[in-house]
Image: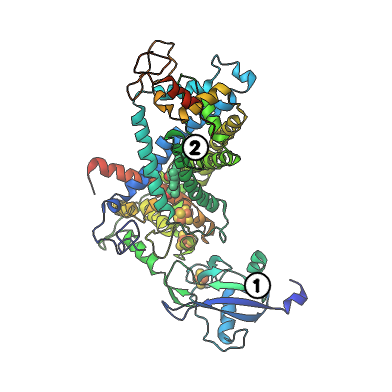
């Protein structure tokens, strides 16, 4: 317990007698953990949840009329995909989440739960912060693995495609497809995303104490109201997105395009943005889509047909 | 309590341990009810007649106490699952709070779980005093020469420092803290309160960097998870959350300074 007794951050006295890199920079790591939760990961989550909210917004007739874009969600995702150095942004986010989650798990292991005897609100919030962190970890993994990386988890095969083989916009349709896969998916997304929302807004509140921004209980109370308001707004976005994804009716041509992509036409996707015939999309294997450049390097018509008539999963 | 209740007996279940490292076990005792009994007087009654409800003659229960007026912190233990001072905790309070006292549902007394047990309800609180040494919890004045009048302190600062000075090193804040464990190296709120207390003192502040170096280490301020149980249970009502936030700020500033000046 005494600072001089144990050298290592893991609390173990059996660790090497020399303080390790982690122990020497303990405070820095802890502050970086806090920072990584608030800024890269947190700010991304706000933008992401707000973007998702459009899936519902764009279905409300009078709101829809305010915008000259019929598929706002598609437009926003296309914008994100068009960002330069998207790969770097993604790598940055992954490092931040990975760092935050890894240390988060280590910190969660220091937790000695005592909420039965000490039922104070803040003790429950502290417990929830840890529980929602673990849920967030599972959720974010499954979410990204199935949609972004298009892993087929066996029981779940809901890859996300921004466009079909012929450029059909698929952002809204494939999101709807993922959430409509079963009632459990909508439930999973609700619990998962709401956990992230709670975790971030409560984290924002504790971070202000951690960094010594809100010192007095009165200041903490005021900041708590701000964090609560933020949390409620994000929760509305989340619930809205889940509702929107469930009420969206996937149109037959979208379903066909989605199925084509799922059946292996995904090579088309990278380049198959609707380009008004200006540019001919090139496939990864060097071929051109059949309907684009009718040359001998295009895949056989039957190949495309076979891909597009694959039954729904 | 009505007159008929007054004649009733009540039951206390004590967690016992014959010595450090020995296996703990529970024993239940029956005591005559009197209004306004505190827990220490129950323990005194048990000591004068250490017979369990099974009629077994046992060694008297060991506990620690000194001031008997909630200023020394020695008698701290876990009563009905919650930490507090056994000198100032009344049987009536516990009966009302937990609905305990009956034979089936007795009042439980346990030693604090975050300190090594010496015997029965008596724990060794040395870790807290060692931590005070680590943070140099004193005001350095060398020599016997006259130092002149002290610096002026604002009323606001005096109020905060007075509140921080009330700490009696009882350990309640550590016992209730979900981040604090017997095995781990987290120092807990008591140390944060005292670090701020001495850092705020004009002369004490000469050792501020040394204290913040300790605060930077594993087990220091950054291990606090802001559950704020400490402030809820502190019997002396120390502004512990304020102390935690202030030490958090001081340590951050200290680290940034170290980064840019290279000073240790
Ligand atoms: C992926 C799994 C995650 C795990 C296991 C995790 C775990 C944790 C834990 C245990 C804490 C408390 C640290 C402490 O109080 O000392 C925490 C704090 C925090 N987390 Fe996470 N987290 C995860 C994901 C996220 C995500 C996705 C966000 C952003 C939306 C986030 C934002 C925050 C913030 C802002 C804090 C507050 C930091 C502070 O109080 O200084 N975390 N996280
Ligand atoms: S801060 Fe309060 S609870 Fe903690 S040791 Fe001091 S008096 Fe006890
Ligand atoms: S705020 Fe919570 S984690 Fe921090 S010292 Fe107090 S009880 Fe422990
Ligand atoms: S005996 Fe001193 S606080 Fe109880």
Nearer the observer: mark 2 or 1; the answer is: 2
Q: Is residue A269 above or below residue A279?
A: below
Which residue is rendered at x = 54% and y = 20% of the image? A71
Which residue is rendered at x = 30% and y = 42% of the image? B256
**Quadrant position of residue B48:** bottom right
- Disc 1 element: loop
The answer to whether any part of residue A180 appears in the image is yes
Q: Is residue A208 above or below residue B9?
A: above
Q: How many marks?
A: 2
The answer for which chain carries disc 2 is A
Horizontal and vertical percent position of residue A145: 44, 38
Horizontal and vertical percent position of residue B259: 26, 42
Circle 2 packing at 10 Å, graded few (<14), some (14-19), many (20+), is: some
Q: Quadrant of the N terminus of chain A?
A: bottom left
Which residue is rendered at x = 35% and y = 20% of the image? A287
The answer to whether any part of residue B153 appears in the image is no
Q: How is the image coloured?
A: rainbow
Cα–Cα span, label 2 and label 1: 54 Å
Which residue is rendered at x = 57% and y = 54% of the image? A120
The residue under label 1 is B105
Circle 1 packing at 10 Å, graded few (<14), some (14-19), many (20+), is: some
Horizontal and vertical percent position of residue B109: 56, 73
The residue under label 2 is A157
**Quadrant position of residue A38:** top left
Does residue B257 appear left or right of residue A176 in this picture? left
Foreground residue among B189 and B35: B189
């Amino acid at each position: 317990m005494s600072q001089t007794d144990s050298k290592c951050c893991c609390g173990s006295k059996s660790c090497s007698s020399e303080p390790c890199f982690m122990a020497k920079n303990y405070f820095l790591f802890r502050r970086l953990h806090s920072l990584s939760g608030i800024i890269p990961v947190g700010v991304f989550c706000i933008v992401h949840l707000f973007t998702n909210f459009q899936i519902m917004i764009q279905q409300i007739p009078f709101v829809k009329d305010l915008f000259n874009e019929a598929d706002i969600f598609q437009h926003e995702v296309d914008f994100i995909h068009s960002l330069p150095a998207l790969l770097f942004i993604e790598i940055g986010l992954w490092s931040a989440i990975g760092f935050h989650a890894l240390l988060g798990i280590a910190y969660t292991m220091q937790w000695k739960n005592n909420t039965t005897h000490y039922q104070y609100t803040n003790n429950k919030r502290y417990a929830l912060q840890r529980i929602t962190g673990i849920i967030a970890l599972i959720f974010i993994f499954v979410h990204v693995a199935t949609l972004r990386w298009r892993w087929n988890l066996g029981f779940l095969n809901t890859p996300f495609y921004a466009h079909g083989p012929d450029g059909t916009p698929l952002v809204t349709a494939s999101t709807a497809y993922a959430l409509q896969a079963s009632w459990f998916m909508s439930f999973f997304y609700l619990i998962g995303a709401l956990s992230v929302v709670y975790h971030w807004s409560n984290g924002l509140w504790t971070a202000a104490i951690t960094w010594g921004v809100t010192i007095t209980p009165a200041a903490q109370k005021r900041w708590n109201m701000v964090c609560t308001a933020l949390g409620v707004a994000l929760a509305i976005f989340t619930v809205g997105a889940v509702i929107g994804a469930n009420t969206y009716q996937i149109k037959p041509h979208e379903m066909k395009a989605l199925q084509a992509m799922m059946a292996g036409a995904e090579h088309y996707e990278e380049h198959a943005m609707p380009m008004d015939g200006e540019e001919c999309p090139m496939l990864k294997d060097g071929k051109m889509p059949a309907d684009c450049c009718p040359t001998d390097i295009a895949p056989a018509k039957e190949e495309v047909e076979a891909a597009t008539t694959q039954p729904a999963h | 309590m009505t007159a008929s209740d007054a004649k009733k007996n009540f039951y206390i279940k004590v967690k016992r341990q014959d010595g450090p490292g020995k296996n703990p076990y529970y024993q239940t005792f029956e005591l005559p009810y009197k209004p306004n009994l505190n827990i220490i007087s129950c323990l005194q009654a048990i000591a004068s007649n250490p017979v369990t409800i099974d009629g077994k003659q046992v060694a008297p229960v060991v506990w620690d106490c000194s001031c008997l007026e909630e200023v020394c912190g020695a008698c701290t233990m876990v009563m009905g699952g919650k930490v507090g001072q056994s000198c100032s905790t009344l049987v009536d309070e516990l009966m009302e709070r937990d609905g305990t006292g009956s034979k089936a549902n007795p009042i439980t007394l346990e030693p604090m779980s975050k300190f090594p047990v010496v015997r029965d309800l008596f724990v060794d609180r040395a870790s807290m005093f060692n931590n005070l040494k680590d943070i140099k919890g004193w005001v350095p004045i060398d020599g016997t020469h006259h130092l002149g009048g002290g610096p002026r302190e604002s009323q606001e600062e005096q109020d905060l420092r007075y509140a921080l000075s009330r700490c009696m090193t009882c350990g309640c804040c550590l016992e209730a803290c979900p981040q604090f464990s017997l095995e781990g190296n987290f120092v807990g709120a008591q140390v944060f309160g005292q670090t701020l207390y001495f850092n705020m003192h004009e002369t004490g502040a000469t050792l501020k960097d040394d204290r913040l170096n300790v605060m930077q280490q594993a087990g220091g301020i950054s291990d606090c998870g802001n559950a704020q149980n400490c402030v809820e249970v502190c019997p002396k009502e120390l502004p512990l959350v304020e102390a935690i936030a202030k030490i958090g700020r001081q340590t951050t500033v200290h680290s940034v300074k170290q980064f840019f000046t290279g000073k240790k």
